[in-house]
Image: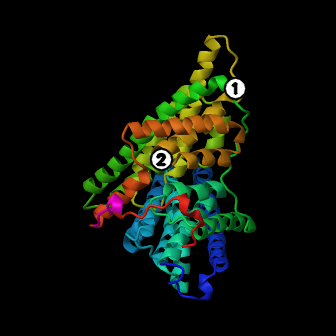
Amino acid sequence: MDVADRPKSWLASDIVYYFIAGLCGLAAGIVGAAFHFIVDRLLAWPSWLTARLGGGIETIVAAAAIAAACLVAAFLLTRRFAPEAAGSGVQEIEGAMEGLREVRWRRILPVKFVGGVLALSSGLVAGREGPTIHMGAAITAAASDLLKLDRMDARGLLAAGAAAGLAAAFNAPLAAILFVIEETRKQFRYTFRSYTGVISASAASAMGMELVGGIAPPLKIACPAMPLWLLPVFVLLGLGLGGLGVAFNRCLVGALEWTAATFRRAPFVPALVVGAAVGMLAIVLPAAVGGGETLITHLVAGKLTLITLLLIAVLRFAGNMASYPVGVPGGIFSPMLTLATTIGLATGLVIEVVLQAGNVAAPPGLGAAFAIAAMGGLFSAAVRAPLVAVVLAVELTGAYALILPVIVTCVTANVIAEWLGGRPIYEILLERTLRLSGQAMPAPAEQEVSSPVGLDERR
């Protein structure tokens, strides 16, 4: 729609549009803070149960029953009222921005919130960013419906809501802005108006969290700069993470397909089984379950052995593959970052041994540096958004001194994933969603691909 054809009303004003985006972002921040607060409080239930029952076999059985009940309840709620609320929600937003999916905000908001609380508080290996991103987009969809915004503004607000939701998940507004621009580059209508709306919503979300006392996951990691002669080692780290990212995506999609085919007649069984397993592990080996947001700094500071780190990595990889197909709200960001942390720390231990064998002193903070770089590298390989990966890793951890090693790792991982035929995980998930609903992805020529070249265009 050209500017001349656009209805002349107060809603046509850019300032009003930015105000709406900011107001939606503020609401997303408040909702995200409330979501975090409730999940954090409920996640203390394994400690409470152990203190009450003493930590024996009866505690493990009770924990299995509690977690299974929570997951089954979350599954039934999601399946009955909003099946599209299962999983991350990022692919649903991308589909809606292409006009292929509908954000049914009246259902998404309550189901994603309540179902997400039930699922994540059980100890499921899933991230909080999935629910907050989808809820942020649902809030902007509500505003678009109530104000009767035109199609272009409505889709722009969806992007702004997704950014606000990600900012609420990690208190990382810059990474959230870049995520929308890089991850949804095929769907995002890149104009000055839509771009500024995304920035407004993301910043307002961070303010909303602060206003209500919301706190982001404690991911700050103190780490000095690394010497330049170590950069080739970060290249090697990127090589391995590129392959791991491709394997992660293929295993995740394979797990989704296998679960759907195997439990077609009893779809609640995965929630029951995974819930019981998660509940038992929450008592026996807590590091193997949960989203991992609070685990990352403990892993870095824990000085764990190589065998322990590899064991945690294997368990968390398997846990993520089992958890995501359950069919409840939950993302993959946080589990991916935690998995990457274990890989990075293990790599750091190996490099320390090699340096010691050559009588070379390892620089301080070597393990932490590899952990931070690995976060970005695995994200880059799986999501195929290297710029977001770099900014997310340094913004979450505060390790801006490591930006060069992180860039090297992320770019290498992204190139290797491309060479191995890897595709962005959310693109794959969107195609799967459309296939199951009987739809087809539009041909490349039909997709409305935007570019920053059009930044100065108003519409």
Residue 423 rendering spot, x and y as whole percentages: 39, 47
What's the CA distance linking mark 2 and mark 1?
Answer: 27 Å
Residue 441 falls inside the magenta stretch: yes
Give the residue type that dot 1 points to: Pro
Residue 313 seen in render: no
Q: Residue at x 67, y 10 (%)?
A: 359
Which picture quadrant has residue 140? bottom right
Between residues 426 and 115, which one lies in front from this camera angle?
A: 426
Which residues, given as a range, are shown in magenta? Answer: 439-445
Q: Secondary structure at mark 1?
A: loop
Percent position of residue 104, x then y: 44, 76
**Mark 1 surroundings: few (<14), some (14-19) or many (≥20) residues within 10 A:** few
Q: In the displayed structure, does residue 26 sit left or right of residue 242?
A: right
Is 26 rendered above or below residue 8? above
Tag count in the figure?
Answer: 2
- Coloring basis for residues: rainbow
Q: Is residue 291 above or below residue 70?
A: above
- Helix, strand, or loop for circle 2? loop
Q: Is residue 366 visible?
A: yes
Q: Which residue is mark 1?
A: 227
Q: Residue at x 49, y 66 (%)?
A: 115
Q: Residue 384 got which mark? A: 2
